[in-house]
Image (tube, rainbow, N blue to C red):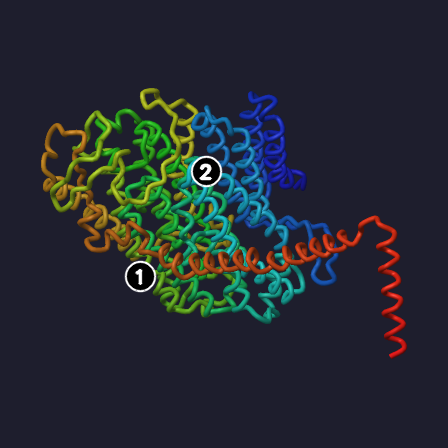
Amino acid sequence: MNLALPVLVPALPALGAAATLAAGRRAPGLARPLAIVPVAVSAVLALVVAIQLGTGQALDAATRLTPTGGPDIALAIHLDGFSSLISVLVGLVATCVQVYSTAYLKDDPRYPSYAALVSLFTAAMFLVVYSGDLIVLLVGWEVMGICSYFLIGHHWETADARSASLKAFLVTKLGDVPFLFGVFLLGADAGSFRIEDVLRAATDGRLGHPTLVALLLLAGVAGKSAQFPLHTWLPDAMAGPTPVSALIHAATMVAAGIYLVARLLPVFLLSGAALVVLAVMAAVTMIGSALCALAQDDLKRVLAYSTVGQLGYMAGALASGDREASVFHLVSHGAFKALLFLAAGVVIHAAHTNSISAMSRIRGLRKRVPDAYWTMAIALIALVGLPPFAGFFSKEAVLTAAEHAANGEALTNGLGPASAVPQAAGWIVLISAGLTALLTAAYATRLFLLAFHSPAGVAVTPVAPAGATGADAVTAGADGHEYGAPYSPEPDEADPAVAEPPAMRWPLWVLAVPTMGFGIAGLRSDWLPALLDGGSLRPSAVTAVIGTGLAVVGALLAYGAWRSATARVPGQAGEHAPGAAVADPGRALLGPLFGPARHGFGVDRLYAALFVRPVGAAARLVRFLDREVVETYVRGSGAGAGLLGRAVRLAQTGNAQTYLSALLAAVVLLVVLVAV
């Protein structure tokens, strides 16, 4: 293979970012082609590289960047089935996002800088995927972090966007600090930062601190991939533009942490304790995020919590020792989650609101956005995990991996012994994943019914009513969303009477194809498994029946609760006033947990009490000491010098007689002192 091809894959979007930023103001008409063409060409090149590499092959190439006195830093490329598959996903999603953004942000004056950052973001993820050196991977890792800061805060005029971008940056950096120490310790133990050397050292048992290394790396993974307890930044990041959400959630930043653990899984297999920690982290993340999603009113926050939970599935597969199942679900999820966010953008464009309860009051919304309606239905079915869509096969692969790990037969596919995975980790993942399957079906059904099929639809924008009756009634705020619900709307200048342009519609159908058909790639051993580690990705009969059954039960429970709640809200059967109440099945399903789940079970408030306020108090104390103590000494020294200067100035009269008198007095004083 010509090495120029994989080198160009991350280089082209980076060059496109520079060109877009340079030409954006001088030639605004060039911004869109400069944003789309390099990313699209990179996507094609990534596919070409994957085809040329073939199945069961790997390619390593490196050149030393600099000596360090210890392990050298090398500009290294590592290509295998995992990197090829994920790079194709990144290219596909990034291209769709860039095309979609040309219409979604067509009137945005800062579009050139936005498009440049998206291209740079894409280049950074390509660098992470193709890198064969941990330090170079770390560069891409951090570039994604700074790009996310600027993209989430794109609408910096709003307080929500400013605080969300800052929160995302700080929370992910909190995980990156121990992650950095983990990378350094891993390089020191292995004697090299080259990933192939690290894996060879792990296989040979030459790592001196595998548990410590694994736990330090997991801190960074928890931050980047939004796993408990560093998951709180992702729902708030919905203040950014919707296409950015699709890119972050589907194929770049949050996928980077999962990909890193998959690449370094032999290191994690050396520590059963780290795998149990990863399993617990995944379990808490899965269940907690699914409960939160069931209580949200903001459409994008529902999808954000859904992403957190699906990342928990991937982390759970890794904790069970099966990176094939994890990456299978990563790619499957990347397709249907990008589709969900882009379809949500079309719905938000038409409804002029993020609020599900406000959408439920709009008559005939599904007829106004038929493309978004049908593609969102496809993506939600994939999210729920019903056959024959991709989400079913990838979710069942995760459940099968957990089942084998629970039985002591972990599917490590030759990366380590099956006994390296504690059975406890398998049971934790299996039980939590089953419960999450039920909850996922419930919140997906709730979202679809409330947004598109509520009988409360009226043709006018709702206003706050004087009050609402009924146990399941929800009142609307002045802008249509529920009172007290977390809500992060984007500035919306679109005319809801104007149909969405083709650039916002055809990417939906492009992404619908892998959402529907990618799952079958795991059924034959000479297809997707041959590209990865060669293990089986076929779902087991037991987990397939149980997983699908739980999903069906969750959907039926949500539907039944919706019908029941609809019947109890007064006036739901006919025409409604603008302030009509909306029946929310989430309240009936969660009961007393609805309020806590809506606000993320108070994790943000807990962090504010434990960390934010003490740090703020310490900062105020430092400011006081700096201004009132340190600056007092500085000002005092300046004032003392000024007083001395004024005293000396008084002695400078310009009178020679006075100077001679003072000189004579001083001489007499000295003579007296010497004589005495």
Is label 1 in a helix, a strand or a loop? Answer: helix
Q: Residue at x 61, y 26 (%)?
A: 23
Number of other residues with Cα within 10 Å of mark 1, as a class: few under 14, some 14 to 19, many 20 or more? some
Going from N to C along the chain, the mark reached first, 2 or 1, is 2
Which amino acid type is shown beneath numbered disc 1?
Ile
Q: Is residue 343 left or right of residue 297?
A: right
Q: Provide the residue designation for mark 1.
A: 431
Residue 244, which numbered label? 2
Q: Nearer the viewer, mark 2 or mark 1?
A: 2
Q: Residue at x 56, y 41 (%)?
A: 50
- Image quadrant containing the C terminus: bottom right
Cα–Cα gap, marks 2 and 1: 33 Å
Q: Is residue 216 left or right of residue 636?
A: left
Between 389 and 645, the residue placed more toward the observer is 645
Between 584 and 611, the residue placed more toward the observer is 611
Vertical side of 620 occupied by 3: above or below: above
Vertical side of 223 occupied by 585: above or below: above
Residue 223, which numbered label? none
Count of numbered circles on the image = 2
- Image quadrant containing the N terminus: top right
